[in-house]
Amino acid sequence: MERFSDRMDEIAAECVRTIAQAKGVPPESITPDTTLESLALDSLDRVTLSFDLEEHYRIQIPEHVLLSMQTVGDVANAVREAKAKREHTATLHDPAVAPTSRSGGGPENA
Amino acid sequence: MTQTCDVAVVGGGLAGSSFAARLARQGKQVLLLERSPGPHHKVCGDFLSHEALWYLRQLGVDIDALGAVRLSRVRLYGEGRFTAECALPFPACSLTRWQLDEALLHCASASGACVRRGVHVQNVQRDHDIWTVSTRENEAIAAPVLVLASGKHDLHGHPRPAGRHAGLVGFKMYYTLAPAQHALLGDTVEIVTFRGGYAGLQPIEHGRANLCALVEADLLTRLGGGWRGLDAYLRERLPVLAERLSGATPMLSAPLTVARIPYGFVQHRSSDGLWRIGDQAAVIPSFSGDGMSIALHSAALAAGCFVDGRSADRFQRELAQQLRMPMRLATMLSLLLVKHPGLTTIAQVWPSLLGHLGSMTRIPRRNLRASYGGAHVHSLYGVADGGDGKVF
């Protein structure tokens, strides 16, 4: 599904920035299709990269996702999914957010 | 004459050196006291698991340049007979402590820590928030913060409890194997179980091999109490070792030994204000391959906690909590294997169990994170690779 929202571009750009800075290459040389291997990003680098992004976005990227990332685009997707999961979990547990119901009633007392 | 500093660290092994490096990079005045005057061997499996490799890279230690050997497989020999083999589910390397400890001490001093060697700490005392460290060389050091990283050697007056799998004696020997045997060993860690202990064999730098053996004290006594009896026993009773060691040349005139290893010990609190890291904080059974990772992790976590202004007690509790499951699992397995080496046949029907177990004693990534933020050094990726395919 294509969603070319600003938010999505921002995440991809941040991933590119983080990787470029870490590897000491110009960000312009990195595109979403660039493979992590071509940037000499090995499994140890993935751990560090994930920590940088997890701290920046306050998310958690699962281990199996970390291992399966092949391109910069995959990294951005991993961030997007983790963000979406965090936001979804937050609304489920936030007492300030009224549970939706078909009857459309107002917020219940907790 | 009393030397003063912000933080005094007793012991320049993996934990002490890496802690000193991290703190020095944060601008603290660190004094590291190491008793060895130069390179030395240590009783250690020399096995660096994924987390250890990651921490070393963080610190800028280039283990490939030091001759580290990649390890990619593990083989299990229950009672000396081939039982199972599988690929290591994570990257790992083999590197002797002779090389690694020196590299880390160098890293500490290059980071700005004051590293003093040939210094033997005899006594530490706390008085009104200042620790006074006295040495055999008749020196005194005063510091508000004291980190205990003396590894296997307990500081006088601060003994560790016995641990949950005590009574094992450790032996370590280096060999040059016969070429055919070296080829058969390949890039594999071989774990050999037997009634009363277990052994590990793996290749190390420069075409040599490291054999470590852990034996219950009772068995050792029955074998004559020393290496000769044990060596003969291992070769006679364990076919794989008989094979591997035939035509092998020992590289040391005598094995390195250590007794009363408190396997399973974890320091839960700091009621005295000491920061305990490395083996002084926790001793995981050796076959887990996580001893060095835990040492490096404890140092990173301690450095992070310290920089964040947390107390020694808070750090010790957090570390103990993080290590609880890996330690429990490894200790249970250790006790089980030594009593029932035949249990290894389970691995015959489930070879990847080996890999799974190896993974279960690892420090979980979320705990690596806890150590990441506090003393983050951003040259982390920065080991120049020149695109030479150094890929794990």
Image (spheres, coloured by chain):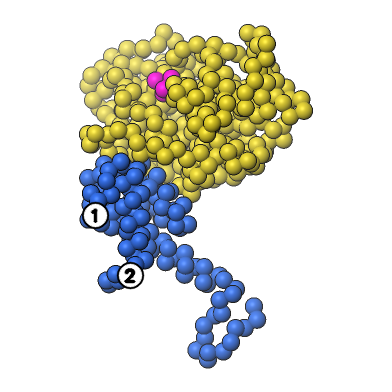
Chain colours: A blue, B yellow
Residue range of the region highlighted in magenta in the rendering: B99-103
Chain-order first, disc 2 or disc 1: 2
Residue B332: give its label: none
Q: Which residue lies furthest to the bottom in this view?
A: A103
Q: Nearer the viewer, residue A104 or B352?
A: A104
Report whether B311 appears left or right of B78: right
* Residue for point 40% across, 11% down: B252
Residue holding disc 2: A5
Residue A16 in view: yes
Occupied quadrant, residue A106: bottom right
- Numbered disc 2: secondary structure: loop
Occupied quadrant, residue B270: top right
- Check if mark 2's residue and mark 1's residue have beta carbons within 8 Å: no
Q: Overall secondary structure of the magenta stretch?
A: helix
Residue holding disc 1: A31
Q: Mark 1 lies on which chain?
A: A
- Residue B315: say if magenta: no
Report whether B371 appears left or right of B132: left
* Residue for point 56% across, 21% down: B32
- Numbered disc 1: secondary structure: loop
The amino acid pointed to by label 1 is Thr
The amino acid pointed to by label 2 is Ser
